[in-house]
Image (cartoon, rainbow, N blue to C red):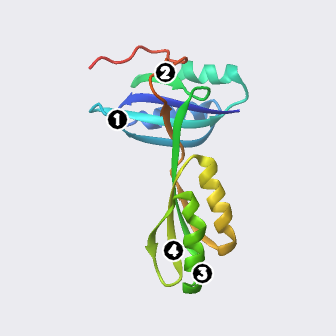
Amino acid sequence: MRRIITMTVNNRPGVLNRITGLFTKRHYNIESITVGHTEVEGVSRMTFVVNVEDERTAEQIIKQLNKQIDVLKVNDITDQAIVARELALVKVSVTPALRQEIYTLIEPFRASIVDVSKDSLVIQVTGESEKVEALIELLRPYGIKEVARTGTTAFTRGSQKTAATHKPAFII
């Protein structure tokens, strides 16, 4: 089962390594990781998409993450109303004659062309993973040269109570 786990951590060297090491030691598969600064200086937000066998395993991951030194707060947001996005860059082989066809194809996805050369286009698309995957599949027949994806980044909508928070929030 696919789970989305977010956490805030102190932005220090080795934190990401220790956390991914925890997943590795316990043979949990990480589908994607995104990490970036938050609104608080010295604090980063991590979003992990992981595949686990069952709810019990997901709960165990949360407990183990909360034991990590620089982890401030952990949430499993899978079953909550969330805003989730991914970014992908897709380089497609294209002749000048096919460019207009590609422009028309990507328009409903609100994707954009970010680089043009004589034999390729680089397309940028953001949205939920399913949207990104759908566009990639539509572009596949044109000849995809490269794909770079960020993985999912997410947080809850509005002001929901977080069900799986196990550490108290940090005080600023």
Give me the C-alpha separation between circle 2 and circle 3.
47 Å
Q: Which residue is mark 2?
A: 160
Q: Residue at x 40, y 36 (%)?
A: 14
Residue 56, image quadrant: top right
Q: Position of residue 164 (x, y in %)?
A: 54, 18
Q: Earlier in the sequence, mark 4 or mark 2?
A: 4
Give me the C-alpha separation between circle 3 and circle 1.
42 Å
SS of the residue under disc 1 = loop
Most foreground residue, 98 or 92: 98
Residue 98: which disc? Answer: 3
Residue 121: which disc? Answer: 4
Tag 4–tag 3 contact (CB < 8 Å): no
Q: Is residue 23 above or below residue 115?
A: above
Task: Using residue 56 as the reference point, say whether residue 68 is left or right of it.
Answer: left
Q: Is residue 106 above or below residue 30?
A: below
Most foreground residue, 30 or 4: 4
Q: Earlier in the sequence, mark 1 or mark 4?
A: 1
Q: Residue at x 50, y 50 (%)?
A: 150
Which numbered mark, 1 or 4, is in the foreground of this view?
4
Please tell me how crowded label 2 is: few (under 14), some (14-19), or many (20+) other residues with Cα within 10 Å. few
Q: Which residue is mark 1?
A: 38
